[in-house]
Image (spheres, grey):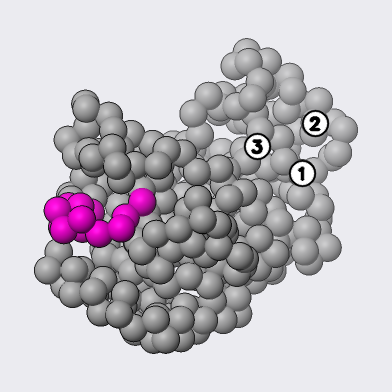
Amino acid sequence: MKILFVNNPPYITYGIAAGLAQIGEEPYILPLWMYPWDEQAKVLRQKIEEISPDFIFADGDPPNVNWEAISENVRFFNVPLIYWATEDPLWFKEISLLRSLDAEFVCTTTCELIPEYQKMGKKAALMLFCCNPDFHRMVESNPEYRCDIMFVGSNYEIRTWVSRFMLQPLLEKGYNLKVWGHWWRDSDKPFTIPPEFYKGLLPYDKLPEAYASARIILGMHLCDTSLTQTSMRTYEVLGCGSFYLTQYTKAHEHLFKRGVHLDWANNSEELVEKVDYYLSCPEERSKIAKAGQEYVYKYHSAEVRARRLVEFLST
């Protein structure tokens, strides 16, 4: 089965596309955003003519991607389009509904929205993010990244309340905390962090090293109401064999066992209590991290996702 991806975020290159290769399928990745806007239709057409894909795979709402170029080629070549609604549920109406119009198959991270896509006449299925054991694994720590607590992710305004809840008490108490990502020192944002805690942008290929170098990895999420939607970070951290402490979400409660695979905090006070507890209990921290890794390797790996996708496309 040949699947042509038109974007290359980590959840594709290290995730579903890697998983497809692992099970013997043929993924091809064409990052359209790298080409001028008015040339993307031609570039995609040439790639389709070259490889004759069985499916074209688009995701989310990547900037600088000409979606009309995708629609035009899907219609011209009559190649089924798979759309992965990675922006669900928050941007379902604004993004996913529009981007999925030309799709025959829709995958979503949000189980509650499957009936909505089915009402549109789409073949719809759940597909969560995942880890890739070939990449997300335990490695040696790196002194450059070493700290007690780490967060890797961007300072989205829509997530300001979570950033305050998860970071403000730790900043005030002066924990050994390192934060990587975009916009944490942007004065136009409603929440920023002091310069001594901000470490810049982390190259994705350094992620396992960074996670191996921190005692606690923090999680933050835009949605806390879905039973299935989480960021890819959950699977990345657990796949790397690191201890993960996140905010409470229904999805984490539904998909994982608290105190077995990971842990969460319901408020800032509980967060500080959890941090102090786990920093003082390295053996329990290690036990939970190991169990979390074993769990995602078994149920949430790129290979597991790829096999489920192939099954979905074949029905």
- Residue 183 placed where, x, y %? 33, 34
Residue 313 visible in the snapshot: no
Task: Point out the image quarter for the N terminus.
Answer: bottom right
Q: Which mark is residue 6?
A: 3
Circle 2 residue? 47
- Residue 285 placed where, x, y %? 40, 80
- Distance between mark 2 and mark 3 Cα atoms: 10 Å
Q: Residue at x 12, y 68 (%)?
A: 269
In this rendering, the answer to whether 284 lies above or below 146 is below
Snapshot quadrant of residue 14: bottom right
Residue span colored magenta: 167-178
SS assignment at label 1: strand
Residue 144 lies in the magenta-colored region: no
Q: Which mark is residue 28?
A: 1
Residue 65 visible in the snapshot: yes
The tag earlier along the polypeptide, 2 or 1, is 1
- Amino acid under disc 1: Tyr
